Structures are given as C-alpha cells and as structure tokens.
Amino acid sequence: MCGIVGYIGKQEASPLLLEGLKRLEYRGYDSAGVAVLTEKELKLKKHKGRVTELAKHVSGNSLSGNLGICHTRWATHGAVTEENAHPHVSFDGKIAMVHNGVIENYLSIKKFLEGEGYSFYSETDSEVFCNLIAYHYAKEDSESETRFPDSVRRTLKHIEGTYGIAVICADHPTELVGARKGSPLIVGIGPDEYLLASDVSAIIRRTSNVVYLNDGEIVSLKNGELNLLTNDEEILTPEIKTIDWDIAESELGDYEHYMLKEIFEQSGALENAMRGRFSDDMSTAKFGGLNTTAQELRQIDRILLCACGTAWHACLVGEYLIERFARIPVEVEYASEFRYRNAPLDKNTLVLVISQSGETIDTLAALRESKRKGYKTLAINNSVGSTIARESDGGIYQHAGPEIGVASTKAFTSQLHILSMLALYLGRLRDMSFQDGLEYVAALKQAPELVTETVKLSDQILEISKKYKDMTDCLFLGRQDMFPIALEGALKLKEISYIHAEGYPAAEMKHGPIALISAECPVIVLATQPDIHEKLVSNIQEVKARGAPVIAIANRSNPLPKEIADDQILIPDCHRAVLPILASIPTQLLSYHIANLRGCDVDKPRNLAKSVTVE
Ligand code: F6R
C-alpha cells in the first residue's frame, strides 16, 4: 500500500531513492515520483506506471541533490494519474511530501483550507495533508530552529487516519522529517547519511542499522543528528536495531520470476522454520518467543486464529491441525471482520494472528483489539521488527526470508509448517503420546525433502497448464484440510492469471455451484486424503457426469482411475501434518505457469499490493 523512501546525506539522492523504491514496488506500482531539494530549488518528477519508467525520466543531472523523497503508489483516493502521484507539493511550493496511508477527515480539512485560499491540483487526501503542513508552517515562528518539524507535529494533531510520511521543506534544504501512525516507517542509519523507508528492503543495501518508528512518533534528520519525539513533544532515545538480512535472498538469481523462485525456496523455508525448534528428546517442538509458560498454555481452552487473505487460509488449515492433534477448539476469523464485531471471547482464549508482512492493517487492528480486551496474543510473522511482531505478547518468526512476489507462496507453506509444530507442541502439553510425538517430529523433519520432490513436478504441471491456460472459469474442490488448500489454489489462480476461480468444499458443490459445471469449467480436485478417498471420488463422478475436465491432485500410492481424471498430479505420500503443504505446491505451480503462459505480470498482478496497510 504505497512505498516511501527518503534520503539525506552526502551522496546523490535520486539514484539511491530509485534503487530503494524498486525494492518497495511490491507495495504498489501504479505510479511513482521523486522530489529532490537543494539550496536553490525543489525539483520534482512523477510518472504514471512503474519505477523503471520513472527512472528513465530521471536522467543525467536533472535531479541532482543530497536530500530527497520518493514514492510508489497503490491508489486509494483518486485515479492513477500523474497529478495524483506523489510527492505532493503544497500550494505555496514550500512543502513536499510522500504519504502511505489514508486520511479519513481530508474532506473537512480541504474545505477549511479552501476557505483560507488554498487550491488543489489532485484528488488525493495526501495533497490535503501536505497543504495542512504548509498552513501550519506559515503560522510558526520563522526564527525558530524547529519551525519545520513543529509544523508537521502540529498538523498531525488534526489528522485522522493512518500515515507514514517523509516530508521536506524548501526553506530547510538540510532537514528530512518523518512520522508514522498506522503505516510502517523506519529510519536507516548509515555513515554520514539517514534514510527513511516503509521497510528494510529499501535500505538494506546501504545499512543494517535501523530505528523502527512507533505510532505517534516523529523524527527529524538534520546535520547528522536524529531527533525522535512523540507527537506530544516528549523526547525519545532512539533504539537502534541491527537487521540480520542476507541481501542475496532478495535477488532474482537465475529465475524468471520471484514467484517461481519462492516456490522453489519452500524446502529451505521449512528448514528455517524448524531450526532449533525441537526438544532435546525430539518428541515435541519448542519456541523461544512465546513469552508464556507451558502451564498458562495448558489453561487455554479456545484459540482464535485471525488473519487476511492467504494467511487466513493458513488459519483454516491451522484449525484442522490444532483441533486434530492438540484437541483444542479453534475458531478462524477474518481480521477485518473480527475488529468490528464484538465477539464474546472467554478469558482463556488465546488469540493468534498470522501475517507475512507483519504490517497488514486489519490484522494489526485485530491484534490491538484483542489486547485491549485483555486476551493473550501471539503472532506468526515473517518480518523481524514489524509492527505486529513488536506489539504481540509473544510470537514465532517464520524465517522464510524475504517474499517479494506479490502472491504469497513460501510464506504460506512456512506458516502451515509452524502451525503443525504448534499443534504438536500444544498436543504434547495435553494428550499426545510420546510415541506419537516422535513420529510427528520425524514427519515434520522429512517435509523439506518431500517439498523438493514435489516442486520437481513443475515441468509436468507446465504441460498441463498449456491445455487449460485459456479457460475463463474453474473450480477448486477439497474436503476437510484440503478445503482451505482449494480456497488458496483459487485465490492464487485468480490473483495472478485473472481467471475466475472458486474454492469449495467438494460435497458442498451440489448445493449450488454444480450449476456452473460444464465442459468450459475445469475442476481441480484435491484427492489426497486416504480416509475420505471414496467420498471424494463420488464428488468427482458428479463433476465428470456433467462434462467438466478434471485435474486431480492425488497421492502417488492412491491415484484416481483414468476415466475420472483427465490430468493427474501425484504428490509424495506423507503424514497428515505435512499434507496441506505438499498439496498446495501443485496449485501454486499451476497458477504460476498458467499466468505466465497468458503473459501476465506474475510478480506484480494488477490492482494488488503485497502489504495492505490501508483498511
Ligand atoms: C495473496 C496474498 C495476500 C496476503 C494478505 C495478508 O497471495 O499474499 O492475500 O496473504 O494480504 O498479508 P500478510 O500475510 O502480510 O498479513
């Protein structure tokens, strides 16, 4: 949901800003812009389209200077146009600002400013925000050393909504100001330079020392100094953290797309999720960051799993895993629904949120609401230092490495693996036997090897994809723990190939969706569970009888008869705790190959952004 970068130092700002911005494109990519400030002037370039397009227009020395801000946009207010692109510049030309977030009261502010003689060139809430800073700036004491940050601070008191901002002022060519509420912002500290950014990927090439801003904090970077204070003027001591990030992990290498690279990285991601997380006797898992005792966890009598999108599908699998292996009742909620629903929860309820980015605003809001009500909260999260990681009572880091492709793949299967480990851990605190624990651990440890085998199906799946790439609709069917995998398969296909796809519990199909079944609507069936195999075969017969082509994902040891499966993808046999992971890989590869064959931009699908930091 928009990426921002700011730079102040001794280097040319614009190449560094654009380099950082390219790494934030997963946050939005419909338009981009950069502003650079020198003693003499404020220079600006904006462009509709991707950062590479903008870079072509920032040639030579046209944007020379050591202080600048830039932005890649995911439109919220106003169409995708150059006028609506950031940075926005105030009516009087003094203030330039980039903004990630949504300002809820911008219409009333706009009306007020219009009454004061201000006029606007864009449809955005951000331009209004920028002008309110200019308004307050004009009113501040012109002799004051802190006139510029004071004007930002004063403005924030009137702003309702969310923001991560980087601001420059034409009168202050040696000062960069940032602030956050609800949208992420970090300060990177390099030798003789500071950077502001939406996340570490934008700055990691220059420094691994960062300060994470908290909501309600504002930072001024000037003359080699970092001044951090709250909106209420309380001066804070910045806490500098060192980021442990292997830069090579975020490079494309020999792969054509990040999504394919990340599908192939899943085996390693599972290894990382398990590292150091088994007990010495190997019959259970252990987690360092739960910040809760085994005794407290034994008292939990209900778990609420809460997330958005693909992470919500991981929650649905988690429900099966935890109920099956730990025998604790689980409920799953969309974070965006939970936060506005006054759901009655028992005091012994544990709220577990799942988020790859750790910045999804609805998941964060659900976490905050749960904490406000006094529930114990945990998070499964892939981004060290993210807001969700910092605000939950305890958590489990995924260590899956950076996920750059907008469609989540390795983060999803790594979440499933951690949920399996958690089910084991909770199960062993209750009824699961030592022997069952040993078998379970052995199965989890075998998972990376089985994933490596499963991704080798890519070439076969490419051939199948060629047959189905022109379909316009399709159904994914599965039962029990394969139902969320059906939902996830459908989501993956629709988001990157733009083919209409639905996921359904296989037996539920005859209560409505069966009306859609025809020769033009292929059905992808997850036929992997031995205990309900016969029931699923009946569901497939119902599909076949209505002429739909069937692509089956089944176990090697239990393939479907050729008469009912037009195409079949056979995955290795495995323990039930690992099955959802293996079954999801063919759906990822099918989506990837189909989207690629259709010429879609696999890593940056239209209208999407990886980190959804607006409601
Ligand atoms: C789909 C996808 C999204 C995310 C969702 C939550 O491929 O990636 O549905 O899963 O936006 O994101 P996180 O996990 O960062 O909270």
Image (tube, grey):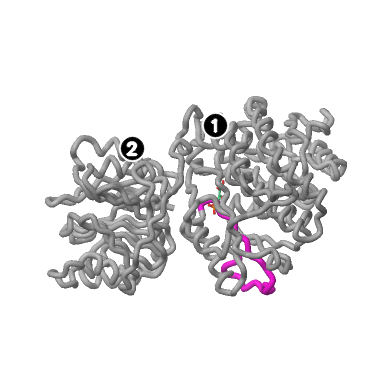
Q: Quadrant of residue 573?
A: top right
Report the side of 178 relative to 145 (left or right). Answer: right
Inter-mark Cα distance, 2 to 1:
22 Å
Which percent across, then down, holds residue 40? 12, 51
* Horizontal side of residue 222 vs 271, given as left or right: left
Q: Is residue 179 left or right of residue 488?
A: left
| Mark 1 crowd level (few <14, some 14–19, many ≥20, 10 Å Cα) | many
Give the amino acid type for the residue marked by disc 2 in the picture. Glu
Could you tell me residue 241's position as x and y percent? 41, 54
110 vs 100: above or below: below
Q: Where in the figure is residue 67, as x and y percent of width and height?
A: 23, 50
Residue identifier under label 1? 596
Helix, strand or loop at mark 2: helix
Q: Which residue is mark 2?
A: 53
Magenta span: helix, strand or loop, mainly?
loop
In the image, what residue occupies the spot 63% across and 34% down?
A: 590
Q: Secondary structure at mark 1?
A: helix
Type of residue at label 1? Asn
Magenta stretch in the rendered image: 338-357
Q: Is residue 334 visible?
A: no
Tell me the residue at 34%/65% (across/down): 237
| In magenta segment, residue 339 | yes
Residue 442 visible in image: yes
